[in-house]
Amino acid sequence: MRHGVFGQKLGRSTKTRKSLLHNLSSALLEKGKITTTVAKAKFARPYIEKLITKARRNSLHGQRTVSSLLSSKAFTRLTREIAPGFAARNGGYTKIIRLDNRQGDSAEMARLELLEWDKKLAKVTQAGKKREIAKIARSKKPATTKKHTEET
């Protein structure tokens, strides 16, 4: 029985499991999508989403934490393009698409990829215009909340 057992081991020791997680997240943030096994994709998904959320907050502590966990190339892409592009989204930055089984060992394969982010918002962030960022983020809210605020 697995009472109170948290997480997955993936048949690895703690150090190799952590390095696998860091490498998968760096590769995904650099390339936009990766092909791996379903178990590894499900293991890496919440970790990557938490990294993007930390990068979105734009605090010094969050940036230092994220930079210590990713490669430099992945970190710069995350902070300059991906995190500002997801400013209007509250979560669910990735998706898992199941593929055919691997030929050699018939392992279940999947593609883990980032959803589309707002390219305009990312460009505005690079320019450093905070007022425009807030304006664009406010305009992205669902129409139901706008109607509700106009009525009251």
Image (cartoon, rainbow, N blue to C red):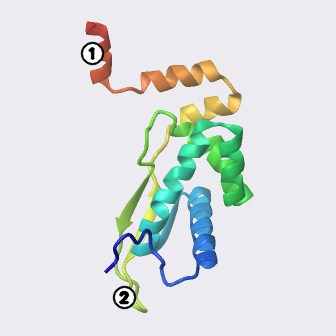
Q: Mark 1 against mark 2, which lies toward the viewer? A: 1
Q: Is residue 124 above or below residue 114?
A: above
Asked whether residue 82 is in view, the answer is: no
Placement of 133 over or under 83, stated as above or below: above
Instruction: Report if residue 18 is visible in the image.
Output: yes
Residue shown at 43% from the left, 44% from the top? 91
Q: Cα distance, mark 1 to mark 2?
A: 52 Å
**Residue beneath disc 1:** 148
On the image, numbered disc 2 is attached to which residue? 106
Indicate the secondary structure of the residue bearing disc 1: helix
Instruction: Give the amino acid type for the residue marked by disc 1 in the picture.
Output: His
Q: Quadrant of the C terminus?
A: top left
Eyeballing the image, is 75 above or below 127? below
Residue at position x 40%, y 73% in the image: 38
Sequence-wise, the earlier of marks 1 and 2 is: 2
Q: From the top left corner, tell me how far across and down residue 51 is, in percent.
A: 57, 51
Left or right, 97 with reference to 25: left
